[in-house]
Image (tube, coloured by chain):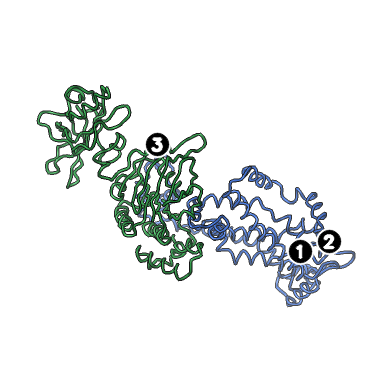
């Protein structure tokens, strides 16, 4: 077990820089999820920790040891790949035992470790099978097993669930999180799925275009996004973002003036902004009695416990809005409703830099 | 095909139907109602197949018959078409004494052929595996240049480069030796290319997983790449064994001592027949039959692997 430190880590392919200086610390025993859209450099960063990609500049340390120049096998890590990368000609047992054999471990110890991992992951009856005789979920567990038997300092997981079907993904998600908590091994987990990130991680690192946007607990990311990207990326359905004109008593969108706290207005004024990006989460809309945005309902998703309505401001062609509505009495398609953002739950961002205005989370 | 499913399938293929591009089975089933009920076609296809088999098999049968009768009977017209009683005598004589004036005993030639074909097949596979591994998994200067160099040699079979190759082999003193018989035939662009293509289909993650497991390149080669290539190796072995066994021109040039003749040259030598010596056709035919057996055995024994290697890769 060990912490992992990133010190201004950069990665370039020739002229092209894909990771622009990452600074972060993963605490001992922590489960950190790196999440971001595809191509943001999250897998590259993980592979740099694994030693599969060289580090162009900066330092990565595992424990107290700088690992920049170390071979993957000397870094004391184990990795789970997206396609599992099981050796197709070896049995499940041999797949798990291979790394231990190379390390010259005794037969008894290997056997004991493999059987223990097989027990944890319920692979017992499958140990003599070949990977091609297993289902997707079973292969995924073998890949996990191969990582566990090594008893490494750090687990690295590169989208290990994306080849599973939706239902299995949900159950495996909780299994992995529980397993990590039980073993207490520092884990860096890469995914593009924000639900995975929010449900699994002790902390989540949101990444975009090779830059870490924010590293925080899932709840803090949701309640206090550092910038407009994090705000839009975290949460499902996504936050509504409008470009608004700033006026003395709030934000003007079309003919309506939307509420905004004094503190944020002051922050916007001190930046000398005339426009801002106004963010409202779907659940932060209230039905406005004759006030607020006039929205023509185009679609209603009734999920039973929740209901979301999708619509366009001011009818067809207007900006799209999604709002959570009362699941007992959802509006009907084609109706026009008035929606009013709750002033205390509104986020406002600098239009140019994307930074969130005002300090601290909205109370 | 079950006729009852036809309308349903057609319904699913309106786009194809409009362009008159429905699968042929559907069209035929629609036209005739039943697919199986075509006795005339059945008879015709069988006749064609039987004629084809006869054309191929009859000469082999004649060879076999000729190897079981006496020399006089072979030369009699017409030659009998029923096997005679001298099978064991003829084969024993060919194996132990040979035939004609200048030929060595067939068993020596069989051993020579077997040894050369095995060395060629195994050598080709070993060298191609290693060179393909180098080309696919290592980054070294001019990697592509070397790959193309290997590829270009595909255009230079033994027959084209026979004079310079002979000169080199002779300068190295390898005439009349197994080394001379096999070494120039071992380098194989085809096999290198095939293995390269196969290695390219192995996911990169497998190599990375092995790196994290602590396997060095050669360990990865030995523990992962070679076991995964088994079926391809088997398919290549069959092809290359037959290639080696059937070599004629090169062994003819590079050997002068009868002890190093391969069986394919041996047969040729037997029917050249020096001077007035009569050609012992029954022995020549026995030799021919024996020369056919090992390649046939290799194909039959390895058929399952061979097909598997050509059709699928164990992934």
Q: Would you say residue A178 is visible in this rendering?
A: yes
Q: Which of A293 and B64 lies nearest the eye of the viewer?
A: A293
Q: Secondary structure at mark 1?
A: loop
Q: Which residue: 49% across, 40% down?
A: A56
In the rendered structure, the colour chosen for chain A is: green
Instruction: Choose between A211 and A359: the one closer to the eye.
Output: A359
Task: Residue B45: tell me if it is visible.
Answer: no
Residue with the mark numbered 2:
B256
Label 3 marks which chain's residue?
A
**Do pointers 1 and 2 mark residues of a single chain?**
yes
Label 1, residues with CA under 10 Å away: few <14, some 14-19, many ≥20: many
Left or right: A224 in relation to B218: left
A102 with respect to A302 (left or right): right
Q: Looking at the picture, how far across and down is residue B181, in whole percent?
A: 76, 59
Residue that badge 3 annotates: A209
The reply to the same-chain question for discs 2 and 3 is: no
Structural distance between the alpha carbons of marks 1 and 2: 11 Å
Q: Secondary structure at mark 3?
A: loop
Mark 1, residue position: B262
The residue positioned farthest toward the left in the image shown: A289
Residue B179 left/right relative to A200:
right
Label pair 2/3, CB-CB below 8 angstroms: no
Tell which of A330 and A126 is nearer to you: A126
Q: Between label 3 and label 1, give the one nearer the viewer.
A: 3
- The picture places residue A48, in percent across and down from the top left corner, at 45, 46
Front residue of B81/A158: it is: A158
Protein chain holding label 2:
B
Chain letter of mark 1 equals: B
Mark 2–mark 3 distance (CA, rounded to whole Å) = 72 Å
> Which colour is chain B painted?
blue
């Amino acid at each position: 077990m060990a912490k992992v430190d990133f010190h201004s880590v950069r990665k370039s392919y020739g002229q092209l820089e894909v990771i622009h200086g990452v600074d972060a610390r993963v605490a001992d025993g922590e489960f950190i999820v790196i999440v971001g859209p595809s191509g943001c450099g999250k897998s590259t960063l993980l592979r740099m920790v694994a030693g599969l990609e060289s580090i162009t500049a900066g330092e990565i340390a595992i424990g107290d040891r700088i690992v920049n120049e170390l071979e993957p096998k000397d870094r004391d890590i184990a990795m789970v790949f997206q396609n599992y990368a099981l050796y197709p000609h070896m049995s499940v047992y041999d797949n798990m035992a291979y790394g231990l054999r190379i390390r010259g471990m005794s037969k008894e110890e290997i056997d004991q470790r493999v059987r223990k991992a097989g027990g944890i992951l319920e692979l017992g009856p499958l140990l003599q099978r070949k990977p091609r005789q297993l289902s997707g979920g079973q292969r995924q567990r073998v890949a996990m097993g191969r990582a566990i038997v090594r008893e490494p300092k750090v687990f690295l997981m590169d989208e290990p669930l994306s080849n599973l079907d939706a239902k299995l993904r949900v159950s495996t998600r909780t299994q992995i999180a529980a397993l990590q908590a039980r073993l207490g091994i520092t884990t860096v987990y890469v995914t593009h799925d924000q639900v995975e990130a929010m449900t699994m991680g002790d902390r989540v690192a949101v990444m975009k275009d090779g830059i870490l946007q924010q590293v925080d607990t899932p709840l803090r990311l949701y309640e206090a996004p550092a910038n407009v990207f994090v705000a839009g990326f975290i949460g499902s359905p996504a936050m509504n973002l409008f470009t608004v004109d700033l006026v003395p008593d709030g934000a003007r969108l079309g003919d309506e003036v939307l509420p905004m706290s004094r503190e944020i207005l002051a922050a916007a004024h001190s930046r000398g902004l005339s426009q801002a990006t106004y963010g409202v989460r779907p659940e932060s809309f209230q039905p406005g009695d004759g006030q607020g945005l006039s929205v023509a309902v185009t679609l209603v998703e009734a999920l039973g416990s929740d209901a979301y309505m999708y619509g366009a401001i001011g009818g067809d062609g207007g900006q799209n809005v999604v709002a959570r509505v009362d699941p007992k009495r959802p509006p009907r398609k084609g109706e026009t409703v008035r929606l009013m953002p709750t002033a205390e739950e509104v986020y406002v961002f600098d239009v140019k830099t994307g930074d969130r205005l005002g300090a601290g989370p909205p109370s | 095909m079950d006729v009852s499913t036809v309308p349903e399938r057609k319904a699913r293929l309106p786009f194809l139907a409009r362009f008159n591009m429905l699968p042929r089975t559907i069209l035929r089933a629609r036209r005739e109602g039943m697919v199986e009920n075509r006795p005339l076609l059945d008879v015709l296809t069988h006749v064609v197949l039987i004629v084809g088999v006869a054309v191929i098999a009859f000469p082999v049968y004649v060879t076999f018959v000729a190897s079981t009768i006496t020399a006089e009977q072979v030369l009699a017209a017409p030659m009998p078409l029923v096997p005679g009683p001298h099978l064991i005598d003829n084969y024993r004589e060919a194996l132990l004494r040979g035939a004609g004036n200048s030929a060595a005993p067939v068993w020596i030639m069989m051993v020579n052929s077997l040894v050369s074909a095995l060395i060629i097949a195994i050598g080709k596979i070993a060298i191609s595996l290693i060179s393909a591994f180098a080309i696919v998994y290592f980054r070294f200067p001019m990697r592509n240049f070397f790959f193309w160099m290997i590829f270009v040699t595909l255009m230079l079979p033994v027959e084209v480069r026979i004079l310079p190759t002979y000169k080199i082999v002779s300068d190295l003193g390898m005439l009349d030796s197994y080394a001379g018989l096999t070494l120039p035939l071992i380098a194989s662009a085809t096999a290198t290319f095939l293995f390269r293509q196969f290695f390219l289909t192995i996911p990169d993650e497998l190599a990375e997983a092995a790196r994290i497991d602590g396997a060095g390149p050669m360990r990865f080669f030995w523990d992962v790449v070679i076991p995964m290539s088994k079926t391809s190796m088997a398919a290549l072995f069959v092809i290359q064994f037959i290639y080696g066994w059937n070599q004629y021109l090169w062994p003819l040039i590079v050997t002068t001592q009868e002890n190093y003749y391969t069986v394919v040259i041996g047969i040729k030598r037997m029917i050249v027949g020096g001077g007035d010596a009569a050609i012992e056709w029954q022995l020549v035919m026995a030799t021919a039959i024996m020369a056919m057996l090992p390649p046939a055995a290799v194909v039959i024994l390895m058929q399952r692997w061979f097909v598997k290697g050509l059709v699928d890769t164990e992934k």
